[in-house]
């Protein structure tokens, strides 16, 4: 995301929160030079995943299914 210094000044808290939530850098242009705001520590993207339930059975039951009748060489 690219911003001007004026836009940063208007929405600084919202922009900082977005950087923290997404982990994406924000680029600011000031007097023809570019600056970046980035999180100091990289985010662990896996920790933000929502748990989902797709299996309606015990996973061990799926592992032990006999698929030999379905196999076609």
Image (tube, grey):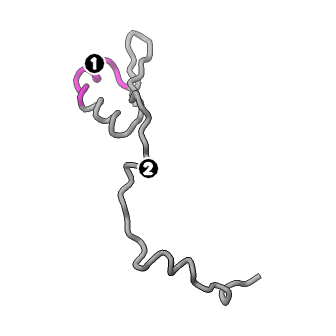
Relative height, residue 49 to residue 63 (above, below): above
* Quarter of the image with the C terminus in it: bottom right
Q: Which residue corresponds to mark 1?
A: 6
State which quarter of the image contains the N terminus.
Answer: top left
Q: Is 30 left, or right, of 70 in this rendering?
A: left
The residue lying toward the viewer, choosing from 7 and 59, is 59
Q: Mark 1 or mark 2: which comes first in sequence? A: 1
Q: What is the quadrant of residue 18 in the picture?
A: top left
The residue tagged with tag 2: helix, strand or loop?
A: helix
The majority secondary structure of the magenta stretch comes to helix
Q: Where residue 8 sits: x, y (%)?
A: 29, 23
Residue for point 28% across, 34% down = 17
Q: Is residue 46 above or below residue 35?
A: below
Question: Which sits in the foreground, 29 or 48?
Answer: 48
- Tell me if residue 43 comes above or below residue 48 in the rendering: above
CA–CA distance in space, label 1 to label 2: 34 Å
- Answer above or below: position of 38 versus 70: above
Q: Nearer the viewer, mark 1 or mark 2?
A: 2
Write the start and end of the magenta stretch as one range.
3-13
| Numbered tag placed on residue 46 in the rendering | 2
Image disc number at residue 40: none
The question of residue 8 being in magenta is answered with: yes
Label 1 element class:
helix
Q: Check disc 2: other Cα within 10 Å, few if <14, some if 14-19, many if 20+.
A: few
Please give the name of the residue rendered at 38% of the width and 13% of the height, measured from the top-left corner. Answer: 30
Quadrant housing residue 14: top left
Number of dots carrying numbers: 2
- Across and down, in percent, residue 25 comes to 41, 30
Label 1 Cα crowd, 10 Å radius (few <14 / some 14-19 / many 20+): few
Q: Residue at the location (57% across, 84% down)? A: 65
Task: Examine the structure image and report whether residue 54 is included in the region drawn in magenta.
Answer: no
Residue 16 in the image, given as x and y percentages of width and height: 29, 29
């Amino acid at each position: 995301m690219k911003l001007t210094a004026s836009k940063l000044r208007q929405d600084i808290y919202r922009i900082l929160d977005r950087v923290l939530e997404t982990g994406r850098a924000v680029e600011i242009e000031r007097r023809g030079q570019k600056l970046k705001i980035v999180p100091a520590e990289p985010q662990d993207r896996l920790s933000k995943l929502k748990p989902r339930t797709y299996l309606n059975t015990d996973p061990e039951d799926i592992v032990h299914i006999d698929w030999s009748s379905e196999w076609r060489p």
